[in-house]
Amino acid sequence: MRLSRAISVQRWVLARAQGICEGCGQPAPFLNEKNEPFFEIHHVKHLVDGGTDSTWNTVALCPNCHRRCHHSIDKHEFTQSL
Ligand SMILES: [Zn+2]
Ligand SMILES: [Zn+2]
């Protein structure tokens, strides 16, 4: 199922990140309600551009870095560096 697969990818990426943002290298800014480091999942290559929902295309980012990937002036350079 599409949804459960997405969740398992998310868990795998969060385990890989070990509580450290893969964008800036800083610890998660806060814990979620499950007492786990809070990260947002970002697709390096957007799904609409042919990216896949797999672990190599997915990074765990703090909210700051995630916004940067979508809205900053250097978003393309920043995304490339991930
Ligand atoms: Zn970050
Ligand atoms: Zn994103």
Image (tube, rainbow, N blue to C red):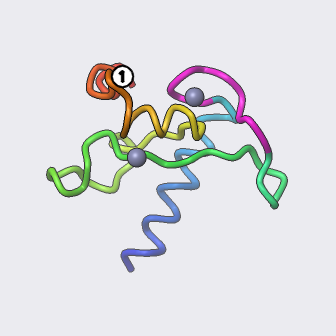
Quarter that holds the N terminus:
bottom left
- Per the image, the residue denoted by label 1 is 78
**Residue placed most toward the observer, 71 or 5:** 71
Most distant residue in the bottom direction: 1
* Magenta part, dominant SS: loop
25 is within the stretch colored magenta: yes
12 is within the stretch colored magenta: no
**Residue placed most toward the observer, 30 or 72:** 72
Q: Residue at x 19, y 57 (%)?
A: 48
Q: Position of residue 51 (x, y in %)?
A: 22, 50
Start-end of magenta stretch: 21-30
Q: Establish if 39 lies above or below 32.
A: above
> Horizontally, is 6 left or right of 25 in the view?
left
Q: Position of residue 70 (x, y in %)?
A: 36, 40
Q: Residue at x 29, y 20 (%)?
A: 77
Query: Quadrant of residue 44 in the image?
Result: top left
Q: Position of residue 13 (x, y in %)?
A: 53, 45
Q: Position of residue 26 (x, y in %)?
A: 66, 22
**Residue placed most toward the observer, 7 or 64:** 64
Q: Amino acid at mark 1?
A: Phe
> Horizontally, is 37 left or right of 54 in the view?
right
Q: Residue at x 65, y 29 (%)?
A: 20
> Horizontally, is 5 left or right of 73 in the view?
right
Query: Quadrant of residue 52 in the image?
Result: bottom left
